Amino acid sequence: MSKERIKSKKSREDILEIIVAIFLGVTALATAWASWIGSLHGGNQATNYTQSNNMAADGNSRWNEASQSLMQDMMTWNEINQANLNYVYAEQKNDKDEMEKYQYQLEQLMNDNCSDEFLDAINWALDQKENVSPFTKDGYVDSYFADANSVLEESNTLLEQGKKDNANGDAYGLVTVIYSVVLFMLGIVGTFKRLPNRTIVLCVAIAGFLFATIYMITIPLPTGFNLLSYFGMA
């Protein structure tokens, strides 16, 4: 084998070693990055799940309170409606004492047991030509549960965000596994004696690195992530 051929082979081996060294360093950094971002997604997932559970419990509690308030108001309305019917009957009989009695009862029931919203609904019902319930007013019953529904909706939003964080964390975990395989392949390049074999293993490792990197770029970063904030710059 001529000196020029030996020198050429040596030069190719040197270039190969440099490429391997560069990709070893870059892949190690990329592996650390993917592991870190994956752990941040895991932390966000745990936080969102915890907040979602807490808000769901709060929302269910508010829903139960709203149901109790609705039942109480229905009972109050029955008393008001009965007192109003008695007042109308006394008015038809022109019984002043009975009218005064039921008028007082109505005032006490409405002043002591009714919220402003309930009073508005009652006045709406009393203004109707037919005898109707205030609970038939459009949207009135739903208003009891508006606060609970708002909390439960926010709980569901956090739950869905937690699911996304879980999926993104799993995706970064897959990227870490691929990078680990790439590191393994880069590490065994030098064990092959023939240069073509080394080149093939290196090319496969580079292809794996590129695939993992491109895939990682498509995965969203954690919500609110800002690298500068870790250095006190944001």
Image (tube, rainbow, N blue to C red):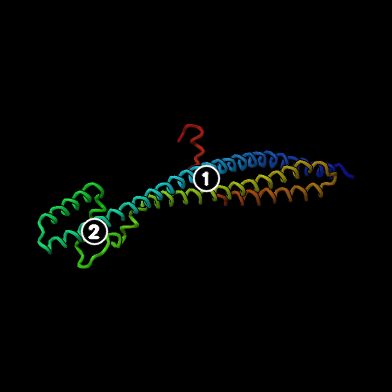
**Residue position marked by numbered label 1 in the rendering:** 49
Residue closer to the observer: 71 or 183: 71
Judged left or right of residue 75, residue 33 is right
Residue closer to the observer: 186 or 149: 149
- Residue 62 lies, in percent from the top left, at 39, 47
Judged left or right of residue 228, residue 123 is left
- Residue 60 lies, in percent from the top left, at 44, 49
Q: Earlier in the sequence, mark 2 or mark 1?
A: 1
User: Which dot marks residue 82?
Assistant: 2
- Residue 186 lies, in percent from the top left, at 74, 43
Q: Amino acid at mark 2?
A: Gln
Residue at 16% of width from left, 51% of height from top? Answer: 104
Q: Amino acid at mark 1?
A: Tyr
Eye-nearest disc, 2 or 1: 2
Callout 2: 10 Å neighbours few (<14), some, many (20+)? Answer: some
Residue at 86% of width from left, 42% of height from top? Answer: 3
